[in-house]
Every structure is written in C-alpha cells, then in structure tokens.
Image: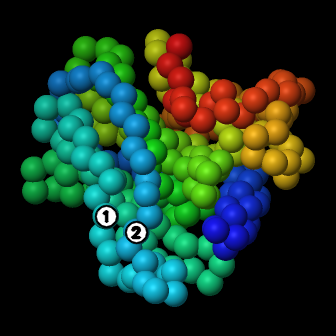
Amino acid sequence: MIARVYKARMLASVLLTAAGLSLLAQSTAPAAASGCEEGHRRFTPGFPRAAADGNIIPGQTIVRARLKIGDSAVVRVVEYPRAGADLDVYNSTIIVQRGQQQTRYLLKKLIKGGEFLRLTETTSLCTFSGQGTVLLAFEAGATGAAQGFVIIRYSADSMDVKGFPSVYQGRIVVNRSAPNRVELWSTTTEDAALCEACRKHYIVQDCEAGQAGVECTQRPGFIGPLDPGKFMLKRIEVR
C-alpha cells in the first residue's frame, strides 16, 4: 500500500510537469462512419496480474473497451502493462479498425505522460447528420487523481483522434453544439500537493481541437476552493 501511494504521488508530479500547457502534434486517419449512437460508460481499471514480488507479470495484453464508431468502424482501447522502476506503465493504445485497415494511436503520443494512464470513462455524442464525437477519459494513480482526455470525431469519410493536456483531480466539459471546444479543469500545482480529499483551487483552460492540433488558453484567476470529489464520478460533463 505504501508503495502504491508513493507511486501515485510521483505520478501526479510527472503528469503535471509533463502537461505544462504544451501540446503534442496529433494524428488523423481516414475512416468510414455514418451511423451514430449516444451513450456513456464507466470502467473500473483494476490491476494487471502481478508476480509474488508485486511487479506486473510481463507479456499481458488487456482489452479495456470495444466501441462501435459509426456504421463500420470499431475502436478498441488496449493496455500492454509493464513494471517500471518507480512507476508502472500501461502503454494504453487506441486501435481503430475499419475492414482490414487498422490504425493505432499510442496514448503517450497523444498525451504527455499518457503511458501511465488507463481508461475509466467514455461518452458518445451525435452532433450532426452522419457525424459524431466520442470522448475518452483516462486516469492514473491509486486513487485516479491524474487524468487525460482524448476526443475522436468522425463522419462518413473521416476520423480525427486528438489528445488534451493532462489534468489533476479535474474534468473535461464539452459543448454539445461545438464538441471540438472544451473546458479542462485542473487543480493548481500548489493545491495538488494537498491531501486527496482537501478542497482545492482550480484553473480552467479553454481548448479547441482543430485539424492541425489542439490549442488551449488558460483563463485568468482561479475557481474555488472546491471539493475534488465533485468531479470524481463525472470526469466528462456535457452541456
């Protein structure tokens, strides 16, 4: 238990440092999707099989979710967990399958520090005729205090996959009428060092996922202090 708490605190520090406000170049792949179904799912990460010394047994492949996207595409979220010296890595990968064509998106390339994150929540939205949006929420640490989010936008002839900066004890707020524009809520770096249940101040970033990448602008000032438990069961909020 002590080891897990230590790893959780170290992980929070790594992800907050990695997030900064720097964004990675994102990937785009063609797809064919026209149907759309709305829904919301939650997942309990659990832990991979471990050896007697507590380290993850190598060679495991864990399918965390399988989602139908449109009429003909399927998205799977797969973990390839490995034990690390200080932090375990899960190597979450988003795999888009369309017929015989398969495109893989490594989470660590979509989100800085993404190799530590695990799927915890999904939300599907239908935006326009033949178009839709899927949001994936990932978390890390023994209490899931660090999060990262991915947006998948699709139409009949395209699919776009992008990641947002990591947050801590936060959430993503999506505008239904413009799902490419989101709010990212995260505790401040100073408040992240407080106890998990302590009330914290929050910063908000306004982000837009465009064709070339993701751009975020931090709002001035802080919000709160707020109870972080407010977001724990609702990482993705749709307005």
Tell whether 183 sits left or right of 149. Answer: right
To which quarter of the image does residue 216 belong?
Answer: top right
Tell whether 11 sits left or right of 39. Answer: right
Q: Choose between 65 and 165: the one closer to the eye.
A: 65
Q: Residue 136, can we see it?
A: no
To which quarter of the image does residue 95 belong?
Answer: bottom left
Earlier in the chain: of badge 1 and badge 2, it is 2
Q: Position of residue 134 (x, y in %)?
A: 37, 33
Q: Choose between 153 and 224: the one closer to the eye.
A: 224
> What amino acid is labelled 2 in the image?
Pro
Tell whether 69 sits left or right of 186. Answer: left
> What amino acid is labelled 1 in the image?
Ile
In the picture, the disc for residue 62 is 1
Say few, some or many: other residues with alpha carbon within 10 Å of mark 2 (under 14 / 14 to 19 / 20 or more).
some
Q: Position of residue 159 (x, y in %)?
A: 31, 39
Contact, mark 1 vs mark 2 (Cβ under 8 Å) = yes
Please tell me which residue is depicted at 21% across the width and 38% down the height of the picture.
Answer: 68
Work out whether 128 lies above or below 2.
above
Work out whether 187 lies above or below 14.
above
Find the distance from the CA under tag 1 to the CA under tag 2. 8 Å
Please tell me which residue is depicted at 85% across the width and 48% down the height of the picture.
Answer: 194
Residue at label 2? 48
